[in-house]
Image (tube, rainbow, N blue to C red):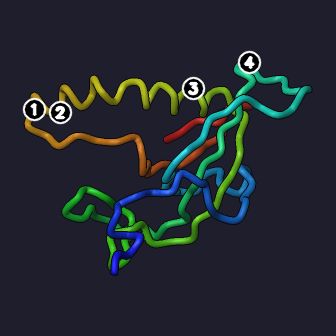
Amino acid sequence: MARFSDFGIQPTTIIGKSILMDDLIGRRIVIEKVRIEKTKFENDKTRLHLRMQMQIVLADFRETADEAGDYFVKDENGAISGQRRSCFTGSDNLIETVQNMQTSIPAINEQRQKAGLPPIDAFPLDCTIQRSGKCLIFQ
């Protein structure tokens, strides 16, 4: 009998109990996936009028990378170990950063291929979200 996992299909739904961005500031997290859409709020004051929903993992991290180069702890199936949460942001800076990352991946992977390195994906993304004045930034 086939198991769903045998098909290698990854759901596009963002899962996890909601968490506020303020609770993530300064905390090292792993972003597994994002969804960027037009905002639903009429009184939105952002420049892009977009919102980003992120599925994050409140993961445990090791001091050294594993054989795949990851610092986050994985379960026996190779999935990121930790609590999955979701959050929304209208931060133009974070949204533009993710869009720029996704756009630059083909060129980065071309350079990596020339250097004999494996390709990378935007996600999962090991990062910390910081506040810089009124802006949010990835580190």
Task: Name the residue: 45% across, 72% down.
Answer: 81
Mark 2 → mark 4, Cα distance in angstroms: 34 Å
With respect to residue 56, does 109 lie above or below?
above
With respect to residue 46, does 35 lie above or below?
below
Tag 2: residue type? Answer: Arg
Mark 1 → mark 2, Cα distance in angstroms: 5 Å
Q: Quadrant of residue 111?
A: top left
The circle on residue 112 is 2
Tag 1: residue type? Answer: Ala
Label 3 sits on residue:
96
Question: Residue 23: x, y in percent?
Answer: 71, 57
Q: Could you tell me if the residues under marks 2 and 4 are in contact, i.e. CB atoms within 8 Å?
A: no
Question: Residue 109: x, y in percent?
Answer: 24, 31
- The mark total stands at 4
With respect to residue 53, does 76 lie above or below?
below
Give the mark, 3 or 4, whose residue is nearer the N terminus.
4
Label 1 sits on residue:
115
The circle on residue 47 is 4
Task: Name the residue: 57% across, 70% down.
Answer: 83
